[in-house]
Amino acid sequence: MGHRVDRNDARVIGGASVGTVFEWYDFYLYGSLATYITRHFFSGVNETTGYIFALLAFAAGFAVRPFGALVFWRLGGLWGRKNTFLVTMLLMGLSTFAVGLLPSYASVGVAAPIALVSLRLIQGLALGGEYGGAATYVAEHAPPGRRGFYTSWIQTTATVGLFLSLVVILFTRTRMGADAFADWGWRLPFLLSGVLLGVSLWIRLKLNESPVFQKLVKEGKTSKRPLTDAFADRRNLKLVILALLGLTAGQAVVWYTGQFYALFFLEKILKVDGALTNQLVALGLAIGTPFIVLFGWLSDKIGRKPIILGGCLLAALTYFPLFQALTAAANPALAAAADRAPIIVTAAPGDCSFQFDPVGKAAFNSSCDIAKSTFARAGLPYRNEAAAPGTLASVRIGDTVLASFDGHALSKTDLAASRAQWEAEAAAALAAAGYPQASDSATVNRPAVVAILALLMIYVAMVYGPIAAMLVEMFPAAIRYTSMSLPYHLGNGWFGGFLPTTAFAMVAASGDIYYGLWYPVAVAGATFVIGLFFIRETRNADIHA
């Protein structure tokens, strides 16, 4: 007779999940507010570089997640699953609350971004210890044949946390107005995390320790050297590497493309109104999130591997047409203008720079840089064509050709005047060709946008719903907390966490608004191939061994 979810099971799943929702809410507030973070903490550099820096600070929290796992793995193996994720929650909540109190760059200069990045690092360390504890805790409570279903509820927490952050931001911004929110109201969602922290701690304090961990303690089988036991064994180390390359790397890029990069693409590249972007993404998340549980349940029936790898393959094959369709639906004027009057920058290859200025001191004054920076800042797609060495860059917008200029020999005053004149001429040509300065909210095809976002979210559900159960099942109980966390956090922290930064930088450098998609397509494709040939199915594994 099948096991039914009783009150104790519901309390275990609910307690672990609710606490994790709040942690993800804390962590993803930053990503949801990246545009405001850029204005207040990275205003000392140009706009494009500032936004890349803001994304790098977002990624910093992911970069340290594997190290957080290293710190908290040992505690999880010695203290237990419950005690460890109480500590991680406290660190996460306090550092998020502190972001809402930080002074801006205008007030304290470079100390502001340094403090911000420091808090992001603390958040990343805490989250590095959180996931393995929560997923292991729930999986070790689950009856045989139900681990995919049980752990899929933990998997929903990241999406629900993002959804909650978008709803809070949307409510706050609507109530106080866009100007006040941009000035200081963006801090309120961070400060609210103090209340959520108290609720989360209260819920988790009521939970008992995992029965598998209690059994290990009783039998004296807990690992005294979890790192050595996990990685000195070549067989186990091989499993960790395969789990990273054949599962979590692809899962991570699909997750961050479907949720965060779609958000950035709509707001930063397609110039859709921020409030409308949040509404559309929130609707897509609401439609897609139940599929996480569905695919977790389905993985108990047909296996984890075909669902996860199927999601990777679908993403790799369809991302380009889906994001092109997203452009047509969210900014139809841009799509029509780009098709009718494409922008082509003709320049000598040596005249063009990679326009990333980490310290705000570089001068991009070549004829190519002046032309490209205009379109990069506006988020407009353009193509590159090579010209003979020594030739000044020119731009063709449909039938209109504009000659750029070399600003190296000009004084600051003359350079500013010439740049202003050039940008005015380019703006006039763009307007004549039908290029919009921003997406017109009245023309956004909302049902189509939500449908595309929901489909991206279904891909997320395929790769994310079964992953916790599969990772738990791949490794022995005594070193499970340690072994499963490393590939998960390397995949999600490095392959996934750096995706928005990498993809946006690729777009800024190339001018092709879809060029950044090559990153998730390549990683998801590689994961599909490696996973297909080297990863074994795990759904019937004995997790008590």
Image: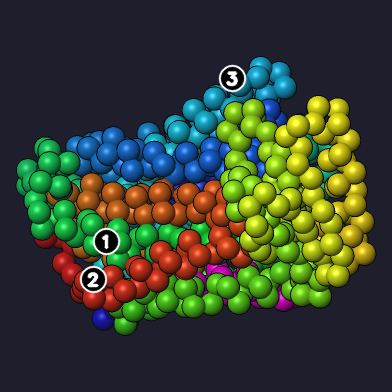
Viewer can see residue 362: yes
Q: Position of residue 527 (x, y in %)?
A: 34, 68
Label 2 and label 1: CA atoms lie apart by 8 Å
Q: Nearer the viewer, mark 1 or mark 3?
A: 3
Residue with the mark numbered 3: 111
Amino acid type assigned to the residue bearing label 3 in the image: Ala
**Quadrant location, the N terminus:** bottom left
Q: Main secondary structure of the magenta part?
A: helix
Task: Name the foreground residue: 330 vs 158.
Answer: 330
Does the magenta segment cover residue 448? yes
Label 1 and label 3: CA atoms lie apart by 39 Å
Labels 2 and 1: the sequence-earlier one: 1
Which numbered dot is residue 285?
none
Q: Which residues are magenta?
A: 441-459
Which of the 4 quarters of the picture holds residue 142? bottom left
Amino acid type assigned to the residue bearing label 1 in the image: Ala
Which of the 4 quarters of the picture holds residue 203? top left
Amino acid type assigned to the residue bearing label 2 in the image: Ile
